[in-house]
Structure formats: C-alpha cells, structure tokens
C-alpha cells in the first residue's frame, strides 16, 4: 500500500526543484525501467502492479494496485510500474567525432526524441544550454525510451563552451547552405535552436558554417520544421 509520504515524494519529482533537491527522478513502464537497471542506475524504489522484475532487491519493491498507480503516474494512461532512480553524476569526458548542441530547446518531447536520435546515430555527447528543458523531466525520460542511459548529456554555458573549441560549428538556418550540397566533416558541433526563435544571436556569431534543409514543396509556405524532425534529417546526412 502506498503511504502519503511516498505519494508526496513521487509527485514532487515532477518538478525540477525537487528532483534537484532529492537527486532523484522517476521512470515508467517495464522497458524504460529495465533499460536504466541494465545501465546500472541506482534504484531507489520500484512500484509495480505485477511481478515483472525478478532480479530486483525485494526490499525496494512495493506491490500496488492500478488505482494507486494512477495517483503517482505522470502518464494519461498509466503503465504497470514506476521506478525512482538516483540521478547519476555528470560524466566529464573528452568527446570525439560529432557533438550535438541544443540552444534553448524547451519541449520535453523534442528533447526526449533528440536523445533517442543521438543514441540511434551514435552521437555520444549532447551539450544542452542551461535554459534547455531538464533531461529528468518525466516527459523527457519517457520520450527517450531508455536511450538516456546511453547518451552523455552535459548542461553548460553554451556560448562559453563553443567559444573554446577549434572544430567546425554547424548551425541550422533558413538562409544556410543546402545540406545536400554542403561539405560535412566527421568531426564538429551541430547546433540546433529553440522551437520558436531558432539559434540565439550570441550562438549564431560562433557558427562557422550555416546549413539548411531545403524545402521541396511547390508552395514553399511551410515556415520551419519541428526541431526533432530537423535533427533526424541533419544527423542522417552527416552520417551518410
């Protein structure tokens, strides 16, 4: 049975300030939870309506009802389980090859999808501006479908970070060079901008090569692509 304190803790983790305070986040669904377990994330507690996790320490498992799961779930249609994990320390690594950088991406679904794309295309390092949505936001965690455990995400002062590197910095702009005709190197940083405003002026000033995804529609009236969709196209072209 769920206690009031457990409900209070889990629901508080939907807010960034409490995730930061407790250094905890939660994930829902067997596949996503298993991905974090396989990646050796430290489990705090597991709430489940079924016997799905035989290898988990029984002291950390709480069997609950479907009704109780609805009280703590962030999903419109709750899954069968919810797990709380400890937030790991950021890894300070020396990145190789292509790096993806996000300048103020605010939508959790977009960030989650972009993390999955990094995992798919083998982008090991993702730099996020300090204004970018938190990777441990429940909606981000769910959208990554477990890929979060395989991508090294670092929150940083993006302007300062980009100022100190010597590899090409690619930025996506409407007036950039057609990506299908551009010379794309295997090493560099690809910057993707905010959903509404694109790349900020201070970051634009650091971009060494502007690229664009051309429009092929007859009317040419679509203003822009969704940032996650654009990221998929750009990463695919760089890897091609």
Image (cartoon, rainbow, N blue to C red):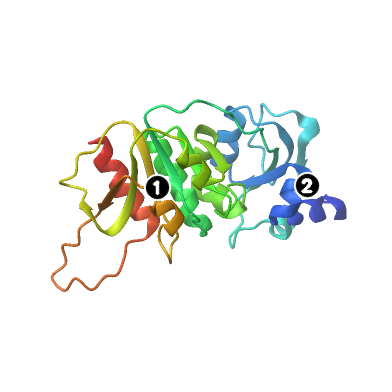
First in sequence, mark 2 or 1: give its number.
Answer: 2
Q: Which of marks 2 and 1 is in front?
A: 1
Label 2 environment density (alpha carbons within 10 Å; few <14, some 14–19, many ≥20): few
Q: Where is residue 32 in the image (x, y as percent from the top left)?
A: 55, 41
Query: Residue 223's image quarter?
Result: bottom left
Q: Which mark is residue 4?
A: none
Q: Can residue 233 be seen in this view?
A: yes
- Is residue 81 or residue 86 the one in the foreground? 86
Q: Which mark is residue 206?
A: 1
Q: Which mark is residue 21?
A: 2
Q: Where is residue 16 in the image (x, y as percent from the top left)?
A: 69, 53
Label 1 environment density (alpha carbons within 10 Å; few <14, some 14–19, many ≥20): some
Residue 133 sits above or below residue 93 on the image? below
Q: Position of residue 236 (x, y in %)?
A: 28, 42
Instruction: Name the secondary structure under disc 2.
Output: helix
Whether residue 102 sits left or right of residue 77 in the image: it is left
Q: How far apart are marks 2 and 1 (CA)?
A: 34 Å
- Is residue 61 or residue 110 the one in the foreground? 110
Which residue does the image show at 49% across and 56% down from the upper left?
Answer: 105
Whether residue 113 sits left or right of residue 148 in the image: it is left
């Amino acid at each position: 049975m769920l206690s009031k304190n457990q409900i209070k803790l889990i629901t508080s983790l939907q807010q960034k300030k409490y995730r930061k305070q407790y250094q905890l986040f939660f994930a829902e669904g067997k596949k996503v939870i298993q991905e974090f377990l396989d990646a050796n994330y430290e489990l705090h507690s597991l709430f489940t309506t079924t016997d799905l996790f035989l290898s988990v320490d029984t002291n950390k498992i709480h069997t609950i009802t479907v009704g109780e799961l609805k009280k703590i779930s962030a999903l419109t249609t709750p899954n069968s389980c919810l797990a709380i994990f400890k937030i790991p320390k950021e890894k300070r690594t020396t990145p190789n090859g292509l790096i993806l950088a996000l300048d103020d991406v605010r939508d959790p679904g977009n960030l989650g999808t972009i993390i999955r794309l990094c995992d798919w295309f083998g982008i090991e390092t993702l730099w996020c501006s300090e204004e970018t949505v938190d990777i441990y936001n429940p909606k981000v965690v769910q959208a990554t479908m477990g890929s979060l455990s395989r991508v090294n995400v670092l929150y940083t002062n993006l302007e300062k970070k980009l100022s100190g590197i010597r590899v090409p910095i690619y930025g996506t702009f409407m007036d950039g060079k057609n990506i299908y005709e551009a010379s794309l190197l295997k090493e560099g940083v690809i910057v993707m901008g905010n959903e509404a405003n694109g790349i900020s002026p201070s970051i634009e000033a650091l971009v060494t090569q502007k690229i664009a995804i051309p429009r092929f529609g007859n009317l040419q009236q679509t203003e822009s692509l969704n940032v996650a969709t654009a990221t998929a196209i750009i990463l695919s072209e760089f890897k091609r």
